[in-house]
């Protein structure tokens, strides 16, 4: 499964049938792909303006929205995303394309700054060839989060998509080809870890974006750093959701926490994973979560009524069972789930609630990449903040409170790249996203993300002002 020494191969996690098998590129083919990207940049893409790029990117968005299931079904088949979620992801990817088509020129407009020069300004210029190393859990959205700003800023793009979602990668490039994007401006690279270093070190690759594990980020970041190349890393998370006793609508808070845990079967970096609840409402909130989790339907991801599909791979299911078993052995209270679903077709993990979780337990220390809710009791907001920050990760977090001003103050004390107050943590093309600590570095999306792979060039025009 994934890739051998010769092929990328995807396996349907619901029925275990082969979905797609694609030959891997050789070292020579990989270097030719980079060469082609450089030639496309020099000979064509660098000579386009914002209007031309926007027209093409909007056409890609329209192509995907007009043929929604054609682009959504590969996600359902390759990594088990329920079909309704898959359609939503294609639409969100299209939104990213449309957003940058509309706002890239404004985000990158020349800035005039007073100095001793007759005229001085900062302009944002493309770098050239960029590489996006992408994961399996949101194959379209995370690809377009990289592609849309990089393309609109004038760079060419090479996608090294995950080995478990080759059909998604092929369909993404197909969308660009269908609408007339210049040849080789967006390309797929099918290589394993052994050849990735050679590609990153290639003289024409000018920047690298990776979404993945902290381990992968450390490896890719080290290679890019040794070549002094800019890198954006969006890595793992163990996001806290702090539920304070003064929360006015606990029902809504429970709805959002449950949503955060079941979207994509919990396989999301920015999902709430540690639910930190103030003591006076602790048991009541657990009851609200249990009531909602018990109603969620697991099943065939192609079934329109399915809420939670299978986990992407069998070994991921086993890893979660190990996390839950170790935490229960350490004293966590199993409120719901936890059992093995061996009699169920597909790689399913049961919706699971663990209460009385302590900061040192496995489900609190490690990222839980599935429908597991870990509930931690705290006596007050000070203890809540201390526990929220007691992790190597720092991607996102949320605060639920009836006092919004208090929520804002607490947000500034949570060591994460983004915080939501009385709402779900999510990525949005209009707003920057990115983590701190072992959750990554750099920003994606918004006006900040598009500036990650540009040359911020200062221009000084003489003579000196008298």
Image (tube, grey):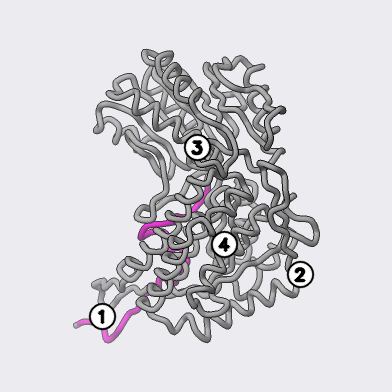
Query: Percent position (x, y) of residue 382?
Result: 38, 23
Viewer-side residue, 430 vs 63: 63
Tell me the CA gap for discs 3 and 2: 43 Å
At a point 61% along the width and 14% down the height, the residue shown is 331
> Which element is circle 4 on?
strand
Earlier-in-chain disc, 4 versus 3: 4
At a point 29% along the width and 77% down the height, the residue shown is 120
Question: On the image, numbered disc 1 is attached to which residue?
Answer: 119
Q: Is 25 located above or below residue 432 in the figure? A: below
> Which element is circle 3 on?
loop
- The circle drawn on residue 411 is none
- The circle drawn on residue 26 is 2
- Magenta-drawn segment: 440-465
At a point 59% along the width and 70% down the height, the residue shown is 187
* Residue density around tag 2, few if under 14, some if 14–19, many if 20 or more, within 10 Å: some
Question: On the image, numbered disc 3 is attached to which residue?
Answer: 305
Tell me the CA gap for discs 4 and 3: 34 Å
> Which element is circle 2 on?
loop
User: Does the segment drawn in magenta span residue 451?
Assistant: yes
Tell me whether circle 3 and circle 1 mark residues in contact (CB < 8 Å): no
Tell me the CA gap for discs 3 and 1: 62 Å
Query: Percent position (x, y) of residue 312?
Result: 64, 43
Earlier-in-chain disc, 3 versus 1: 1
Earlier-in-chain disc, 1 versus 2: 2
**Foreground tag (4 vs 3):** 3
> Which element is circle 1 on?
strand
């Amino acid at each position: 499964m994934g890739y051998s020494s010769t092929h990328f191969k995807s396996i349907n996690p619901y029925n275990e049938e082969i979905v797609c098998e694609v030959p891997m590129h050789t070292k020579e083919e990989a270097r030719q792909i980079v060469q082609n990207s450089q030639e496309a940049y020099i000979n064509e893409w660098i000579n386009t303006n914002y209007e031309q790029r926007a027209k093409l990117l909007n056409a890609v968005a329209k192509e995907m929205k007009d043929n929604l299931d054609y682009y959504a079904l590969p996600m359902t088949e390759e990594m088990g995303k329920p079909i309704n979620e898959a359609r939503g992801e294609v639409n969100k990817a299209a939104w990213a394309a449309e957003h940058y088509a509309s706002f890239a020129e404004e985000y990158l407009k020349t800035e005039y700054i007073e100095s001793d020069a007759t005229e001085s300004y900062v302009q944002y210029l493309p770098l050239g060839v960029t590489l996006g190393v992408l994961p399996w859990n949101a194959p379209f959205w995370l690809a377009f989060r990289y592609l849309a700003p990089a393309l609109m800023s004038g760079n060419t793009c090479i996608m090294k998509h995950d080995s478990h979602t080759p059909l998604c990668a092929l369909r993404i490039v197909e969308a660009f080809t269908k609408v007339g994007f210049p040849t080789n401006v967006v390309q797929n690279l099918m290589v394993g870890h052994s050849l990735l270093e050679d590609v990153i070190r290639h003289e024409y690759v000018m920047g690298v974006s990776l979404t993945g594990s902290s381990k992968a980020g450390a490896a890719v970041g080290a290679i890019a750093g040794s070549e002094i190349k800019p890198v954006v890393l969006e890595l793992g998370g163990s996001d806290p959701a702090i539920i304070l006793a003064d929360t006015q609508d606990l029902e809504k808070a429970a709805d959002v926490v449950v949503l955060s845990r079941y979207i994509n079967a919990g396989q999301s970096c920015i999902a709430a994973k540690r639910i930190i609840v103030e003591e006076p409402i602790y048991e009541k909130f657990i009851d609200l979560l249990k009531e909602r989790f018990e109603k969620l339907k697991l099943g065939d991801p192609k079934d329109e009524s399915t809420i939670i599909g299978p986990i992407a791979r069998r070994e991921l299911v086993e890893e979660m069972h190990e996390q839950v078993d170790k935490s229960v052995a350490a004293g966590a209270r199993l409120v719901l789930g936890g059992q093995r679903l061996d009699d169920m077709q597909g790689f399913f993990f049961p919706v699971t609630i663990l209460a009385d979780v302590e900061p040192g337990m496995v489900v609190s220390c490690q990222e839980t990449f599935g429908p597991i809710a870990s509930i931690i009791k705290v006596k007050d907001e000070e203890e809540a903040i201390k526990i929220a920050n007691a992790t190597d990760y720092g991607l996102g977090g949320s605060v639920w409170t009836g006092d919004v001003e208090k929520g804002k103050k607490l947000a500034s004390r949570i060591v994460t790249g983004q915080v939501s107050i009385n709402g779900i943590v999510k990525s949005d093309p209009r707003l920057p996203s990115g983590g701190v600590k072992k959750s990554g570095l750099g920003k994606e999306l918004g006006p900040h993300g598009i500036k990650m792979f540009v040359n911020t060039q200062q221009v000084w025009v003489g003579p000196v002002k008298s």
